[in-house]
Image: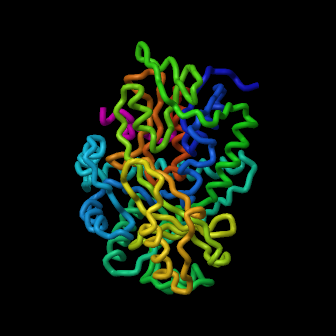
Amino acid sequence: MKQDKGSVLVIGGGIVGLSSAFYLSKAGWQVTVLDKEDFTDSCSYGNAGMIVPSHFTPLAAPGIVAQGIKWMFDSKSPFYVKPSLSWSMISWGIKFLRHANEKHVTRSAPFIRDLNLYSRSLYDELQDELAADIDLHHKGILMLYKNTKTQDEEIELSHTAQKMGLDIEVLDKAQVQALEPDVQLDVLGAVHYRCDSHLYPQALMQSLLAKLQAMGVILVKHAGVTDVTVSNGKITEVIGGGNSYKADKIVMASGAWLGTLAKKAGLNVPIMPGKGYSFLTDTFQGKIQHPALLLEARVALTPMGGKVRIGGTMELAPINHVINRNRLEGIVSSVPKYYPEYTLPVPAESETWHGFRPCSPDGLPYLGASAKVTNLVIAGGLGMMGLSLGPAVGRVVADIIDEQPSEVKVEIFNPERFN
């Protein structure tokens, strides 16, 4: 019989919130999860489904500022920052600029790598525990490039990856084509990150929800949090969906809304939403074998559920649900540049998914116990690595609440580092 250690309230129904609930419930806690929607519309559903130890470089990295300024003047570019006079946007931008340097990247990379590798191992265990087909494959990811500048940059990065112990291989055009014999490729070559994996996010999320229900976790829909009461250094009440919730421990895992939620508890956890788009297509008829990143275009392409999901763009702006057709066209038009046999139609709005990546200004997650609010754990700010890091972050959350040592070091992810 499961030991009852007390109650935990998890705020957020994405992969981080559900993974936290899973490991906490396994450890003997009584768990309730609040979701502002109905658990079917988080960023965890429409992403590229990639598990990426390859992504050990934080978003705040050298060169991204200059490149971003160039892209801002192209309506179809993969990156856009909406000019704003809001203090939160200006403050976030100043912090980002301070961290976009080589020293920050070098310091951060081993911690991001370890968290991703830990998550990849947990996904193998999770697939067995869910007893469901989540379309998990360990084929790696192809970093496809078309020009010599990108080739040089990617090969240099691959040398760093090898020194960090990651399983990679640099491929010429013929070697890449041999990995994808059923489609024609127009590339100079690729770096094959064999350490990476992929899965079908929708199958994962649905299976995880079903598992949590079977474990007795309480899942509350349409319970967006409007108020948090802090008394004597502890959260004593949470108002969600008009109802009152109390618990021994609180986990904030609310994705792009984390900054707003943390502010209700008196904390500064800066987050900027990074809007991205994706859509599913059956144009490739099952011929693509490996997920790929089209590097110059910053577009991801992943086989899943019998189709291929294509996604991209990063729009840093206040949350809005307007679909920018120009940026969607930019994603679509990039595909035949790498796969010349295939010209895709621009999907209708009804077939286009959009979501908001929770981006911290230094490109690092927020993960740890609050020093200011003693019964609070914060987990978020995972940017483009939300699905990749979800199980590892959830497991660390459970370890923190259980007061157990974690398998990976997370001190660098201190959630109050900007307070």
From the viewer's side, name the closer residue of 229 and 119: 229
From the viewer's side, name the closer residue of 16 and 284: 284
The quarter holding residue 20 reads: top right
From the viewer's side, name the closer residue of 65 and 352: 352
Identify the magenta region.
407-419
Residue 306 horizontal/vertical position (percent):
69, 68
Asked whether the viewer can see residue 50, the reply is no
Residue 124 horizontal/vertical position (percent):
64, 52
The answer to whether residue 136 is left or right of residue 17 is: right
Asked whether the viewer can see residue 295, the reply is yes
How would you classify the magenta stretch by its main secondary structure? loop
Tell me which residue sits at (65%, 73%) in the image.
282
Quadrant where the N terminus is found in the figure: top right
Residue 304 horizontal/vertical position (percent):
64, 65
Q: Is residue 418 magenta?
A: yes
Q: Is residue 11 magenta?
A: no
